[in-house]
Amino acid sequence: MSQLEARLSIATLEAAAAALRALAHPLRLAIVDLLQEKGELPVKDIHGMLNIEQAVVSHHLGILKSKGVLIVRPEGNKHFYAIKDEEVAQVLTYVERCF
């Protein structure tokens, strides 16, 4: 067993890879960047600020949520999205520094 395997379980590595695949899309990166800047937002605000159709935003939010990148808080008929773990936002900081 390698040192990496000793520190991180296969399940953890698979979850991390799934989250990175979820982030590997320009619209999803834009959503995470917006949420990093503004904090928790409802779907309507995200779609308005990014000028993307609401159905498209909802689709990408669903992917990010299912892979553990975002959390959702329902309030009445609205759903508010936020970054689940602020360390995810560090991925964007890394991308900005590299490019």
Image (cartoon, rainbow, N blue to C red):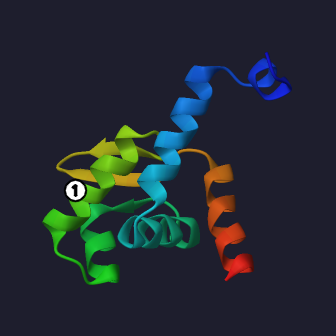
- 80 displayed left or right of 8: left
Q: Which residue is mark 1?
A: 59
Residue at the spot 52% in from the left edge and 50% down from the top edge: 20
Tell which residue pokes out farthest to the front in this image: 1
Given residues 23 and 73, the one toward you in this image is: 23
Residue at the spot 32% in from the left edge and 61% down from the top edge: 42
Work out which quarter of the rendered image holds the N terminus and state it: top right
Count of marks overlaid on the render: 1
The answer to whether residue 83 is seen in the rendering is no
Tell which residue pokes out farthest to the right in this image: 3
Place of residue 69 in the rendered image (x, y in percent of width and height, measured from the top left): 48, 47
- 68 displayed left or right of 48: right
Given residues 46 and 16, the one toward you in this image is: 16
Place of residue 92 in the rendered image (x, y in percent of width and height, measured from the top left): 62, 68
Amino acid at circle 1? His
Place of residue 17 in the rendered image (x, y in percent of width and height, measured from the top left): 53, 41
Q: Quadrant of residue 45?
A: bottom left
- 52 displayed left or right of 71: left
Residue at the spot 52% in from the left edge and 70% down from the top edge: 33
- 65 displayed left or right of 76: right
Work out which quarter of the rendered image holds the C terminus and state it: bottom right
Q: Compared to 29, does 73 lie above or below?
A: above
Tell which residue pokes out farthest to the top in this image: 1
Local packing at callout 1 (Cα closer than 10 Å; few below 14, some 14-19, many 20+) is few
User: Helix, strand, or loop for circle 1?
Assistant: helix
The answer to whether residue 41 is seen in the rendering is yes
Place of residue 73 in the rendered image (x, y in percent of width and height, measured from the top left): 36, 43
